[in-house]
Amino acid sequence: MSIKNFNSNVNSIPELAPQWQKLNLREILKKKAAFVSISQNKGLYTSEGGLGHERHYERGSLEATIRTVEAARKRDNFVSYNWVGYNIYRHDYPQSVFDQAQYSTWVENIDVSEDKIRFDNELADELQQVVQPGDNHFFEQALQSAFFGTQLPLELQRKQVEVIVFTGVHLDWCVEGNVRIARDNGYLPIVIGDATGCELEEQEPAAFERINNIFAPVLSSEQFVSLLNDEE
């Protein structure tokens, strides 16, 4: 499968923070692992999508996600594959008063049909082509995490997962939120930087620095593949 890589953010990925340089990531990536794609919906990955103006379909993260998942499929220790969607309109989410105020503000003056909502919520076509039987596809129910109100925690526990490899958008929101919660729940999260993206490209360096310095290693998809293949 070939996806043109228009404008990858790979050059914004920082050097591994000193603490991660002390680790043998090759050995860590041999532990039981899960792949988790966050919010890689048509609403973000098509020009006609509700958030198509962010142009993620031209920013390289689809190509990097496919490179990542295809490499993981070749390793027996990757025991769980999860495609986590989200409804960008959030009309059917459980809501606190904060959520009601925030979600309603985001969709003010937006008139969308049920067909448009269904379209925006579908997994990007390019990723549908790499989904396999046994993969999980479900939707976030919270502001920025798949660890609440979904099957993900039980999936990880039952399969005794230790490492979680994250791709998706938005890097500084749902990806970072999931990484923080994964870390605090004892998992070893790893972010594939060029398989992610912020709303704006200029927001990405700061998000990479924050995540890499505090919460989890940030790798490029090529670094990830090299580590899986025991390449120097």
Image (cartoon, rainbow, N blue to C red):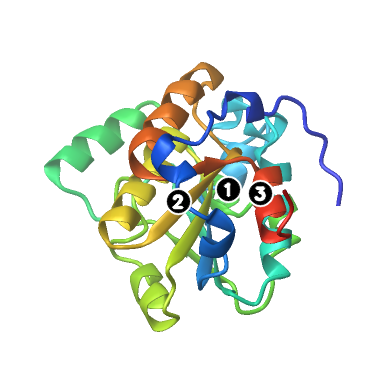
Looking at the picture, does residue 179 appear above or below residue 103? below
Task: Say which quarter of the image contains residue 186.
Answer: bottom left
- The residue located at (54%, 31%) in the rendering is 15
Determine the residue positioned at 21% across, 41% down. Answer: 100
Mark in front: 3 vs 2 = 3
- Is any atom of residue 89 visible in this view? no
Q: Which residue is mark 1?
A: 41
User: Judging from the image, what secondary structure is the residue with disc 3 in?
Assistant: helix
Residue beneath label 2, please?
Answer: 86
What residue is disc 3 on? 65
Mark number, residue 159: none
Mark 3 residue type: Thr
Give the image location of residue 56, x and y in percent. 63, 32
Question: Which three-letter amino acid code belongs to the residue tagged 2?
Answer: Tyr
User: Contact, CB < 8 Å: mark 1 with mark 2?
Assistant: yes
Residue 159: horizontal and vertical position, in percent? Answer: 45, 81
Of residues 108 and 9, the one nearer the viewer is 9
The mark nearer the N terminus, 1 or 3, is 1
Foreground pick, 12 / 155 = 12
Task: Work out how far the residue at label 1 is from the one at label 3, CA to CA, in angstroms.
Answer: 13 Å
Residue 59 placement: quadrant: top right
Measure the C-alpha gap from mark 3 to mark 2. 17 Å
Give the Cα separation between the discs numbered 1 and 2.
Answer: 8 Å
Density class for disc 2 (Cα within 10 Å; few <14, some 14-19, many ≥20) is: many
At x 44%, y 49%, the residue is 87
Task: Count residues near mark 1 (Cα–Cα under 10 Å), then give few for <14, some for 14-19, many for 20+.
Answer: many
Residue 27 percent across, percent down from the top left: 55, 63
